[in-house]
Amino acid sequence: MPGSLHIITLVKWVPDAQLERQIGEDRRLIRSEGILGELDEHPLEAALQIKEQYDTEVRVSALTMGPPGASAAVKKALQIGADDGFHLTDEALQAADIWTTSVALTAAINFVRSTASDSDFLVLTGMASEDGETAAVPAQVAARLGIPALTQATDVVLKDGQLDVDRISGRRFQKVSAPLPAVVAVTDQANEPRYPNFRAIMKAKKKPTTTFSLAELGLTHYAVESKVSLLAAEPRPEREAGEIIHDDGAAGQKTVEFLSKEGLL
């Protein structure tokens, strides 16, 4: 691989799925406790595998956007193996929709790129975020950067400055290629993420993390004004008790009728 490569991996601080989600008075999801999204560990692993393939020619940066607590996602990424971390945080981004997120992340990616003179760069993301689950941000970021978007990737290979990606499209498996730079959205089928050991955790404490705001990106609050407004939000109602079918000789028939009524047959 000629020259050097800067891999920018987008990571997100999401609510812990093991905890009950609650809505605050501002009609937004309470994010007092969160973790690095599990789906974001796969693009990070893909980045580290490329780094190990080319050794010192590759720099892996973890980039997140979110409230102050989102620094935990960057910290975990550094423990897993990223070389440095970047955290975009600003009150104007609290209610960011997909459009706003892609605008802010594109500017943040350019900011991260400006910290090095690498000849090539690659943006790796997860297939979706566990909280929004739109899977639309990677393609929007690629469009704003003016570079190819390779989504639903189940395998990523970099050779001679070109990406070869296996991807899923509906029920079909495809092989696609693109030159650098590019944005690749990696699925949870691509690899098995590594776990940080004690040495990696201690080493991460010495890795640099840069925190910055919209002002440092040259963006005003108006530039990231969301296009979607939340009108109402309320907790999901408790599940109703299911129907119990006792086998009195007609259980099979009742089961078929129930499944047919629910549109499952």
Image (tube, rainbow, N blue to C red):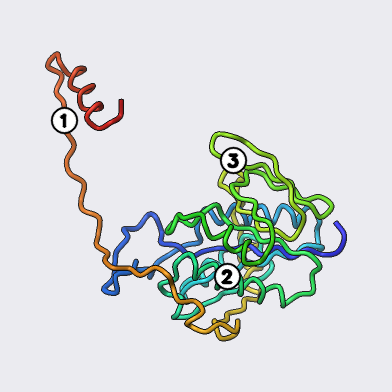
Q: Identify the mark at residue 105; answer none if there is no mark.
A: 2
Toward the viewer: 97 or 20? 97
Quarter of the image with the C terminus is: top left
- Name the residue tied to disc 3: 168
Marks 3 and 1, how far apart at CA:
40 Å
Q: Identify the mark at residue 80; answer none if there is no mark.
A: none
Give the mark nearest the N terminus, 2 or 3: 2
Q: Residue furthest left?
A: 248
Give the mark nearest the N terminus, 1 or 2: 2
Tell me what residue is drawn at x 58 percent, y 42 percent: 189
Marks 2 and 3, how far apart at CA:
25 Å
Classify mark 1: helix, strand or loop.
loop
Tell me what residue is drawn at x 55 percent, y 73 percent: 104
Q: Identify the mark at residue 244; answer none if there is no mark.
A: 1
Residue 76, above or below 159:
below
Give the mark nearest the N terminus, 3 or 1: 3
Q: Residue furthest top?
A: 249
Residue type highlighted by circle 1? Ile
Quarter of the image with the N terminus is: bottom right
Q: Is residue 129 left or right of residue 157?
A: left
Residue type highlighted by circle 3? Ile
Classify mark 3: helix, strand or loop.
strand
Residue 205, above or below 129:
below
Residue 245, above or below 235:
above
Marks 1 and 2, how far apart at CA:
50 Å
Tell me what residue is drawn at x 21 percent, y 46 percent: 239
